[in-house]
């Protein structure tokens, strides 16, 4: 495991480097390019030894170096789940999934430029149960993104952004709270003792992995409850957002155009979840969408 630059935080993640004789597979190669090159050199390898890049999902803090590596070695095969393929194929689709427009989109484009992001066409699409390089089995774990996957092999789990950092991130327009919950259930049924996340810290103890995963999963339920508690009478999304903002230090949300948007989509995703659970309903009055308790 190569710990990512910037403490493995955005725009970086931890990378898994898997060496099988002369061939190398990289899982989410966004740990930092110089850093990655040094690690390759340390084991007597170079870009030309890389055979495969496997992505856990389409986010740039996992995929931004796909294009750079493909440029160094055109034989590299890029693999991703079919539901996230469009997210790396087209930056416009990337922005659509993030719900970015106007200033936020321009701002995000400058981040893409800074990190040298390039859209790439995947060479192979996988799905639940497929075997990928290194003999890992694909565990489709949607929620964070529709095509998010973890990879499992003899007690080892490559977990991507089921990373146990803070609470599960469901702030894309295509994120889904209930899917994330069910995906964690799927992981809880696996027998593993090595947990390798895309961010945060690895864990090497089965009991601790299971207990941390349950705590992480519970945060989905608790956030849903908190939002449910805010709803009295019928409220618009703006009113719910204002109530949510009053409950915490809002400086970070008001200063960063992404954070404000992420907050909005996060709230919408929880409202959708509460609707699905039969706790609230959405009504339309005078052309306004309103949410009220059932
Ligand atoms: Zn992500």
Image: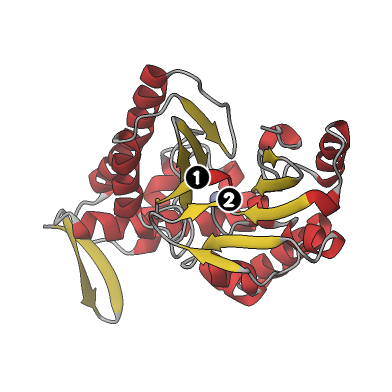
Circles 2 and 1 in contact, beta carbons < 8 Å: yes
Whether residue 99 is visible, yes or no, is no
> In the figure, residue 189 lies in which quadrant?
top left
Find residue 140 and report its horizontal and vertical position in percent.
40, 53
> In the figure, residue 290 lies in which quadrant?
bottom left
Residue 35 or residue 269, whichever sits in front? 35
Which residue is label 2 attached to?
133
Callout 1: few (<14), some (14-19), or many (20+) C-alpha neighbours within 10 Å?
some
Find residue 115 and report its horizontal and vertical position in percent.
79, 55
Q: Does 286 appear above or below 234? A: below
Residue 213 or residue 126, whichever sits in front? 126
Render colour scheme: secondary structure
Q: Which mark is residue 267?
A: none
Q: Is mark 2 within 8 Å of ligand 1?
A: no
Distance (Cα) linking label 2 and label 1: 7 Å
> In the figure, residue 20 lies in which quadrant?
top right
Residue 227 or residue 235, whichever sits in front? 227
Identify the element where label 1 is drawn.
strand
Residue at 49 percent across and 60 percent down: it is: 172
Which residue is label 1 attached to?
136
Q: Does 253 appear above or below 175? A: above
Residue at 61 percent across and 73 percent down: it is: 101
Find residue 61 and report its horizontal and vertical position in percent.
66, 50
Find residue 54 and report its horizontal and vertical position in percent.
61, 53
Q: Is mark 1 within 8 Å of ligand 1?
A: no
Quadrant of image for the N terminus = top right
Quadrant of image for the C terminus = bottom left
Residue at 59 percent across and 51 percent down: it is: 254
């Amino acid at each position: 495991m190569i710990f990512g630059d910037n403490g493995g935080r955005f725009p970086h993640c931890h990378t898994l480097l898997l060496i099988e004789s002369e061939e190398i597979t990289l899982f989410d190669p966004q740990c930092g390019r110089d850093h990655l090159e040094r690690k390759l050199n340390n084991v007597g390898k170079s870009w030309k030894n890389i055979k495969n890049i496997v992505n856990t999902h389409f986010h740039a803090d996992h995929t931004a170096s796909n294009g750079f590596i493909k440029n160094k070695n055109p034989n590299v095969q890029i693999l991703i789940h079919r539901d996230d393929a469009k997210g790396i194929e087209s930056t416009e689709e990337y922005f659509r999934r993030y719900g970015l427009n106007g200033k936020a989109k321009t701002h995000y484009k400058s981040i893409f430029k800074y990190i040298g992001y390039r859209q790439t066409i995947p060479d192979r699409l996988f799905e639940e149960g497929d075997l990928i390089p290194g003999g890992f089995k694909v565990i489709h774990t949607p929620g964070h993104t529709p095509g998010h996957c973890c990879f499992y092999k003899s007690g080892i789990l490559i977990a991507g952004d089921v990373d146990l950092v803070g609470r599960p991130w469901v702030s894309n327009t295509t994120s889904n709270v209930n899917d994330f919950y069910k995906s964690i259930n799927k992981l809880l049924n696996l027998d593993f003792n090595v947990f390798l996340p895309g961010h945060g810290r690895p864990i090497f103890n089965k009991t601790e992995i299971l207990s941390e995963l349950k705590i992480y999963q519970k945060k989905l339920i608790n956030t849903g409850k908190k939002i449910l508690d805010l709803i009295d009478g019928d409220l618009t999304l703006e009113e719910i957002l204002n109530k949510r903002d009053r409950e915490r230090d809002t400086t970070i949300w008001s200063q960063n155009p992404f954070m404000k948007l992420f907050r909005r989509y996060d709230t919408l995703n929880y409202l959708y979840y509460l609707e699905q659970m039969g706790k609230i309903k959405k009504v339309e009055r005078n052309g306004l969408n309103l949410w009220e308790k059932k």
